[in-house]
Amino acid sequence: MQKIAVIMGSDSDLPIAEKAVAVLKEFEVPCTVRVMSAHRTPDEAAAFAKAARADGIGAIIAIAGKAAHLAGAIAANTTLPVIAVPAGGSTLGGLDALLSSVEMPPGIPVATVGISNGANAALLAVEMLAIADRDAEARLSAYRKGLSDKVRAKDAEISSRF
């Protein structure tokens, strides 16, 4: 199975990365976790992106706040799918990072999930792997069934009260 890379612009993004890694572990998807900055270590970030496919990575989750250029810098250097997670720690509550993540130039797409939503980024990465991996698809189907079962149980509990 291919790995998912979880990279963050700074260690202050670690709580978001940990949520992504927890989901990847739940789905038995191997991952690598790194700290790289689009601005402070641009050469390392570019080298990582360029080598990612050869290193067995199938998708890259890039977590960054404020200017949030990490996902775009990574996407510019790879043809692998890149998922941006705008971090919400700024004075603007992550809106600045969200807008920086979704406003990519034509030809360099980056998928973007909600502010600080590392778990959804990991789920999207697993969905990408599941296109060609039947085991990942089976785990996703079971996960979705579990979500449905929880909602049905809550519905039954609440509707029985009224």
Image: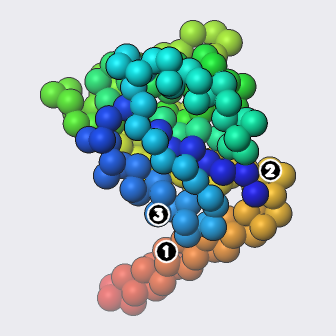
Q: Are marks 2 and 1 in contact (CB under 8 Å)?
A: no
Q: Which amino acid does label 2 sit on?
A: Ile
**Vertical placement of residue 91 versus 142, above or below:** above
**Vertical placement of residue 150 versus 99, above or below:** below
Question: Residue tagged by mark 2?
Answer: 131
Going by the picture, which residue comes out furthest to the top?
105
Q: Do the residues labelled 1 and 3 touch (CB within 8 Å)?
A: no
Question: Residue tagged by mark 1?
Answer: 151
> Which circle's residue, 1 or 3, is located before the other in the chain?
3
Left or right: residue 37 compared with residue 62: left
Q: What residue type is labelled 1?
A: Val
Question: Residue tagged by mark 3?
Answer: 22
Q: Can residue 94 be seen in this view?
A: yes
Estimate the spatial distance between the alpha carbons at disc 1 and disc 3, rounded to whole Å. Answer: 22 Å
Going by the picture, which residue comes out furthest to the bottom?
160
Q: Which amino acid does label 3 sit on?
A: Ala
Going by the picture, which residue comes out furthest to the left?
91
Q: Residue at x 73, y 51 (%)?
A: 2
